[in-house]
Structures are given as structure tokens and as C-alpha cells.
Amino acid sequence: MIEINLAMNKPLAQSSPRPIHGGNRQWAATIAGVNPADILDFSASINPLGMPQTAIAAMQSQLSELGHYPDPEYSLLRSAIGKFHHLAPEYILAGNGVAELLTWVGRDLANLEATVVFTPAFNDYYRALKSFDCEIERYSLIEDSLAISPPISINSELPFIHNSRQKGILINNPHNPTGYLFTKADLYPYLEEFALVVIDEAFMDFLEPDQQQSLIDLVPRYPHLIILRSLTKFYGLPGLRLGYAIAHPDRLARWQAWRDPWSVNSLAVAAGIASLADHDFQNQTWAWLKSAKLQLLSGISKLSGLHPLPNAANYLLVHTAIAGTTLQLELLQQHQILIRDCLSFPELGDRFFRVAIKQEQDNQRLLTALAAAIR
């Protein structure tokens, strides 16, 4: 039963500031009074199957190469990504995760009158945009009302935006944190209306190929289109930091000139090449997600005061009648389970929390803990 005064958390919060990203097990372990390895982490939406065995073998084979600098052009990795997407390698730039690439996105967007962002939005977008003093225009993607069930709906119609041809737009698809999936038809008009269109597809790989709504194939036709992809989430490699941008070669050459050399390490390169070729792992992930997501969505829906939003991603955004930070604290202290609070999304605040989809036994452990907490 929850009988918690959040003031209890203040001394810990002062020495360990509340994280703005998921996956901070060290912070969670401080709150729970356990070792980080004892935390069951639902706050980071990473494939729970772990990294492919082919990626582990590829990294082991490259250990002797750590005494040498990586290829600064990352030719083999770019060729592997190009083969995966049926694109020439010059349309690809590997990065130290999508976070690094967002920095260069922000620098390009700073040349425009403003950047349109759908809210709630991933906090790192604001970091990248504010780094270059970008003007930000926010448009709400959600309509929140306790009078409907579930008490949140998606408003995907883009409102009229004055002078859009002098502005950029930054979208993630599927959207984080709602998991809403824009269709290709939803996105096509943006290519005609904005000076620069950036689509972050970090979670697109979790959809089976016939369900994906990527615009990667349009990049050669639209020099003002940028697609960002992550290899760390789907392939379970967050510690290696690996992502890539797909854009016009002239733009990517400019980014390459801006950034530090060798931003991607040799082990990440090896793991990325092997992972993209591992079709068995991809099929295993899609099979796992289909059943595990249904289990967690159905289970949370049956709990009083919790309303998960159906979506296309490997996580669930949940409207909660109990403050999300209160639930987070209870789950950490009583069950060593970490969920993602939504305080870093000002439009959501303490009325929501987000959880990743994990293996079914872990999902059940979360459901049992949630049921105990709200009883």
C-alpha cells in the first residue's frame, strides 16, 4: 500500500539529481538501497533479448584491433548499413549514438527561422536545439481528458504553421513517449511544407518490415530530408553508443568536418555490422515483442487507475491516477523495479509513467508489483 511522503526522497535527490533519461540504474540503486545489478529496469526501452551473439563474436574478433585507430570513414559499417537499406554508402554517416547526430541536426536547424516540435518531446531534442539558440515552436500531439477512456488521444493533424517554408520540423516516428506511429501519408506533406525535415526513427526497427513507415527511400529525392536511426535499442547495445544518419552526401560531409574524428569505436563498428546481418535475431525480436506487448498492455489495463495507451513501439505510456513519482518510489523501495517517470516531459508531468516491454516473466513481476502498490 502506498503511504509515502515524497519529501523522503529530497536528501537523495540533492546528492543524486533525478535523471532526465531512462536507464540510470545507479540513481535507482541509491533510492532502493541495493546494487545497480539488482534493479529490474523498465525505464529504458532496450531489447531485453540482449545483444546478438553474432555481435559479441564480432567484437571478440576485433579485440586485437583496439591497438589501432578505426577507419575514419567507417567504410565497412556504412556499406553494411547501405546494403541493409538499399542505399549508396555516401548517404550514411555513423555516429556515437543518435545523441551525437542530434547535435549536428541542431546546428543545421539553427540556420532557419524556427523549428517545429511535437510535444511531449524527447528531452535531448531541446538540448540539441538550445545548444545553437534555435527558436522552438511547440505543437501538442496529445489531447488529455479524464472524460474519455483511455484518458489520452492523439492529435496527429498538423495545424497551420505560418512561414513553414522558412522553418524546420523535428519528428520522432514512432513518437516517444506516446508510441504513436505516423504513416508515410501523414509525413509526405511535411516534405513540401518545410525547409528541413528531420525524422528520428530510433524505434522503427521494432516494427516488422511490412508495418514500418520509414521515409528512408525518399532521401535521395529530397536533399532537405534527414533520417536518424539507432542501432543500440533494437540490438541491445546502449553501452556501445551507435547510430547513423541518412541524408544528402553534401550535408553529411559538412557534419563530418564539424565533429571530432573517430567518434565511433572499433567494437561498435564490429557489433553494428554483425547485428544488421543477423536476420534470425531480428525475427526473434519481432516474435517476442508481439506476445510480450499484448501481455503487458492487457495486464496494466486491468489495474485500477492505470490507462496504457496502445501504440506501435516497444514501450507503453500509462496515464495514472496515482502520481508517477510516487509509484516509481514505491516500486524501487519495495520491489527494486525502475519505471520511467515523465517529469522530463512537462506536458505529461506526474500524471503519466512509461515502461518498456520486457520478457514475459519480468513483465509479470512488474504487474504483480503495480497491483500491490495500488491496492
Image (cartoon, rainbow, N blue to C red):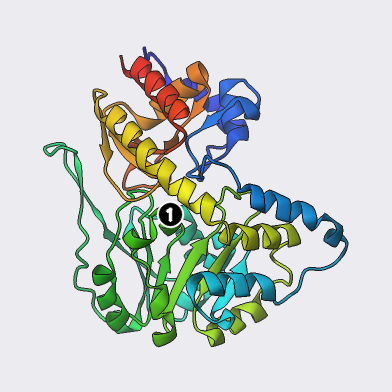
Q: Quadrant of the C terminus?
A: top left
Q: What residue would you read off at disc 1? A: 122
Position of residue 135 measured from the top left corner of the image (x, y, whole percent) = 40, 70
What residue is at 41 percent from the left and 44 percent from the top? 287
Residue found at x 32% / y 51%: 312
Q: Can you give x and y, in whole percent of width and height, for residue 72 in the image?
A: 74, 75
Q: Is residue 260 above or below residue 300?
A: below
For residue 86, side relative to residue 346 (left or right): right
Which quarter shows the N terminus?
top left
Image position of 286 (left or right of 58): left
Q: Identify which residue, 52 or 15, lies in the foreground.
A: 52
Q: Amino acid at mark 1?
A: Phe
Q: Position of residue 289 (x, y in %)?
A: 40, 43
Residue situated in front as seen by the camera: 283 or 5: 283
Observer-nearest of 324 and 256: 256
Q: Quadrant of residue 32?
A: top right
The image quarter in which residue 316 lies: top left
Q: Could you tell me residue 143's position as x and y percent? A: 19, 49
